[in-house]
Image (spheres, helix red, strand yellow):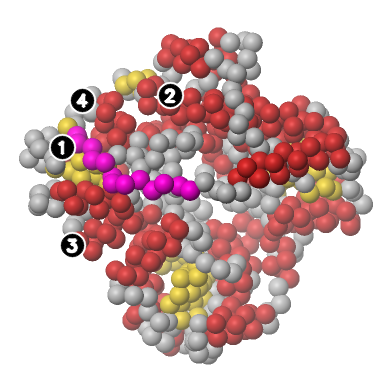
Amino acid sequence: MICSLSKTIVVLVYDRRGTQRCFEELSRFKEASWVVCDVRSQILLSEKGLSFITEQDLFSGEEVRLREDEELARDLSENWFKSLAEDSSDIPFDIIETYYTRQFFSYFLVLLRALHLLERIHSRYGDCTLVTTDLLASPHSIRWSEEESPIPCLLRSLGKQLYIKWEILDSGKETVRKKQPLKSLSFIRNWLRSLLDLKLFPQKAEVLLLGNPKLLGPVANELESEFKMNALRFRPTFQNNKLKSSLDENKIRSLLEKSRVFEIKGMDLFSLVWNRIKIFYQQEYPKSKASAQTTSQFLKKINPKVLLVDEDVTPYSKMAVSQARKLGILTIVVSHGLPGLRHGFSPLTADYIAVWGDFDCNRLQSWAISKNLIIATGNPKYDNLCKTDKEEGPSLKKIWMEKFGWRVSAPLILVTPDSFKVNGLELFADQMKTPEEVLMQAECFLKVAKEIPQLRVIYKIKQGKWDEAFYGALAKKWGGLPSNMKWVSEGTAVELIKASDLVFSGWASSSLETILLKKPLFLMHFLEYAEIFPFSAYGFKSKVKSANAVLEVCKKLVQGQLPLNEIVSSQECLTRPFLLARDGQAANRIASFVHQQLQ
């Protein structure tokens, strides 16, 4: 039971279970203000009839500060360990740590956003008591999960400096995660496979490909068929969670404290970040060191002239590229997606990067990647889409409509919404998409389905308990899912696009796939923020910015008044800048570049 609360009470929640706990404890305080960082919590509070604001409401007008947070998070992720390398020349601290800059960037960004959020709460509510719940799980990695928040740690360490009174409730019984029964067997399997990789795998290859087979497979096929080059699609496996770090943690801690690298705006955050850094040195560092050695031996055995990867920012890919470059192997990234966020593409570790089109070239150059390292090729994963049989669409529509017992002649729309972020506080100044927008999109089409019964709606969601729980709770809030609408997790987006009469998309890949398949497309953009990919600047006009706009488009579709052919024709303005060409030759262009480099 909470006592001695200030007159103004602010309840901050970031998970559904913690929200329920706060509601049970604080429902008698009618004057409490609620701040929500989780869409499932928004649904619960709506059911309880409580008003609330979101973290995005508090950050409104803070774009400059948000951008500063990002730059600081990026600087920390790239430099926090540099003092260790300077003071411990016997240990190459600046090598393995750089493999994890992307993960540390996300970690530091959430931490800084949480600090920023507390400052905004104090600025808005003044002398208040902030009530929240504790972490649901102890830290286990260098990233925040969707069930964690740094808020309790910040309050305990810096509450007085932030001029905020606080009370932290436990969030109830913790869910005990059952151990995987075959976990020990997986260790044995991976260990045996590692031995096979190094000792029994006899094959040599001119080109080694590590990454998404749908992206790199077409390139391998072109290398082999067109240029008669031996291409190997393989990845050495190394996994042993029982390795222990031989590093002196006390020395590392002392050096980091002395460096004061985590002193930000007069506040020392070292005590907050040390636990994650310690976990990094206990778990990731020894595994990465061993994995780097295994990969280096594997590369020497295969002896490729070229290494192709689908990205060079996640730990293993970055490590593989680094090891390959040490051995004089040419390294090329075949871009896995459009460059929306800098920390997924820059700085470039590989020698070259093959990108989808002119837009990618311009954006990467703006992120200080030399023009000489960028090759515009198109996306090899989309080559087959350029050759799609137009007659395939009606047959696929018939399959899906009959699957749900729908009349085949009814108009069918597909919705490919934005994805949830791992943590609600992981916001970007130039990409202010939050889980709130996902909620708005879902509620919009629930309304559309209810108001236009002649329409059929397939809403493509990801598989996973997080999504299923969210969409299940949302449908319950709306009195159940309408019979003419389905949440669909199975099947591919491409298959569903082919089957649909009209597509509403919230993300770039689905949009470009729709354009290549010559299906009419509308982009959803419900909140006010800068476009991640400036389709408008290239002449794209089919957009909807509100539920009412979506409703009007769908009514016209049902009434046969939507100029579908004109919409399809207008979409071609994006082909050149975002896809380079519609000729299906992206894989061949990449293979040609590889062949030229070896001449």
For mark 1, give the secondary structure. strand
**Label 4, residues with CA under 10 Å away: few <14, some 14-19, many ≥20:** few
Is 384 displayed left or right of 498 in the figure?
A: right
Q: Residue 49, which numbered label? A: 3
Could you tell which of marks 2 and 4 lies nearer the N-terminus?
Answer: 4
* Disc marking residue 160: 4
Question: Is disc 2 placed on a helix, strand or loop?
Answer: helix
Alpha carbons under labels 1 and 4: distance apart: 12 Å
* Residue 397 in view: yes
Q: In the picture, which quadrant includes the C terminus?
A: top right
Q: Earlier in the sequence, mark 3 or mark 4?
A: 3
Residue type indicated by callout 1 = Thr
Q: CA distance from mark 2 to mark 4?
A: 21 Å
Q: Are marks 3 and 4 in contact (CB under 8 Å)?
A: no
Residue 129's disc number? 1
Q: Residue at x 86, y 45 (%)?
A: 595
